[in-house]
Amino acid sequence: QVQLVESGGGLVQAGGSLRLSCVVSGRTVSRLDMGWFRQAPGKEREFCAVIRWSGGSTAYVDSVKDRFTISRDNAKNTVYLQMNSLKPEDTAIYYCAAGLTQNRYSSPAGYQYWGQGTQVTVSS
């Protein structure tokens, strides 16, 4: 059974930073595409970032590019999302996702496993 557990969310002022963590059990992160999505109230779940299992390449949605960094620690079976220069519009529940996306990495449908989410609130 694959489980993903996120942590690291919280309340931060605009311009601040947070680091989200996603610990994976049941599968090896090095063999899965690992993604971060977010969902604000009343909005659809939005792709933020992915780190591909093959080669470790990364991709980001334009709105977080140059502010967020996704990384993984294979030894700890953990994926991170470092979020800098946070803005109020980054406020959302952030979800970790894992799967063999077959290049559908920006779509929630590309992922087979999801965490429960962690709340990030950025105050102005």
Image: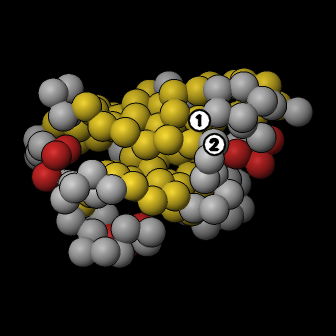
Residue at the image point whose x is 79% and y is 25% from the top: 13
Question: Decide: marks 1, 2 in contact (CB < 8 A)?
Answer: yes
Q: Which mark is residue 67?
A: 2
Residue at the image point whose x is 39% and y is 55% from the top: 58
**What number of labels is visible?**
2
Instruction: Label 1, secondary structure: give it.
Output: strand
Instruction: Label 2, secondary structure: give it.
Output: loop
Query: Which three-letter amino acid code belongs to the residue tagged 2?
Result: Arg
Per the model, the C-alpha gap separating discs 1 and 2 is 6 Å
Using the image as rendered, state which of residue 15 and residue 23 is in the foreground.
Answer: 15
Residue at the image point whose x is 44% and y is 28% from the top: 7
Query: Which three-letter amino acid code belongs to the residue tagged 1?
Result: Met
Residue 33 appears in the rendering: yes
Residue 92 rendering spot, x and y as whole percentages: 65, 46
Quarter of the image holding residue 4? top left
Using the image as rendered, state which of residue 66 and residue 46 is in the foreground.
Answer: 66
